[in-house]
Image (tube, helix red, strand yellow):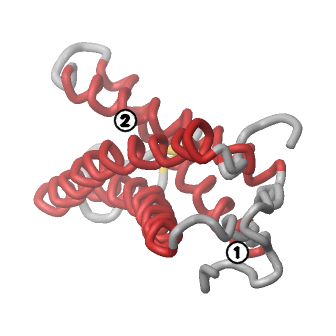
Amino acid sequence: MNHLTSNNLTQTQKPKAAYTATARGLHWLMSVLIVGMLALGWYMMSIEDEPGSDWYFSLHKLIGITLLLLVVLRLLWRWANKPGLLPTHIPRWQVIASKVSHYLLYGTMFAMPIAGLLGALFSKDGLAFFGLQLPLVSSNHDLSELFFSVHSIIAWVFVGLIPLHLLAALKHLFINKDAVFQRMWVGKK
């Protein structure tokens, strides 16, 4: 039996509906926002020097700070509401891969807005959140560019992690048919 799962589950049992409505809501809201932010980020960089592009940058910053707050909320929620165990038929290496990929996803969800926030705080423009100007750290172009570069690299990490996460979820839905996908899906369990 898999040592990372509970000893009281048999191999034919399905995992319990482990995620709360709050966890599922945060997951899907953040999924949409993150994919939208990746698209918005690349679009705004393609029009960076055009008139009116400031609006897109302001929107990106606003949503980015909101996502950072949602990540903190999600991490606190997950810490207080541990998800259920995976079914025992899942090989140990897949359980480990699932844990590693989730740590990487949470790490990128946290690091990406932090890098963007720091890049903006060190930029000459500073950063506002719903009209409230956040304290400007002394403008430093080199530090700003460094943090924005890290922000961009993390975007590419997301581009790799998101399809892997999606493919694993779809594998559970269509190939394994083991109800792992349904634990995070909306609606009835």
Query: What residue is pinned by disc 1?
Result: 79
* Residue density around tag 1, few if under 14, some if 14–19, many if 20 or more, within 10 Å: few
Depth order, front residue of 93/185: 93
Residue at far right of view: 188
How far across and down, in percent of the image, does residue 152 sit? 24, 48
* Residue density around tag 2, few if under 14, some if 14–19, many if 20 or more, within 10 Å: some
Q: Quadrant of residue 177?
A: top right
Q: Which mark is residue 38?
A: 2
Q: Is residue 115 left or right of residue 88?
A: left
- Height in image: 80 above or below 118? below
Q: Amino acid at mark 1?
A: Trp
- Height in image: 146 above or below 174? below
- Height in image: 56 above or below 10? above
How far across and down, in percent of the image, does residue 146 sit? 16, 59
Mark 2 secondary-structure assignment: helix
Q: Are marks 2 and 1 in contact (CB under 8 Å)?
A: no
For the C terminus, give its image quadrant.
Answer: top right
Q: Is residue 142 left or right of residue 4?
A: left
Q: Residue at x 61, y 86 (%)?
A: 3
How far across and down, in percent of the image, does residue 112 sit? 38, 55
Residue 139 visible in the displayed image: yes
Q: Residue at x 45, y 34 (%)?
A: 35
Q: Amino acid at mark 2?
A: Leu
Q: Residue at x 74, y 80 (%)?
A: 6
Residue at far top of view: 51
For the N terminus, give its image quadrant.
Answer: bottom right
Q: Residue at x 37, y 50 (%)?
A: 161
How far across and down, in percent of the image, does residue 127 sit? 41, 47
Q: Is residue 101 left or right of residue 77?
A: left
Mark 1 secondary-structure assignment: helix
Of mark 2 and mark 1, the one earlier in the sequence is 2
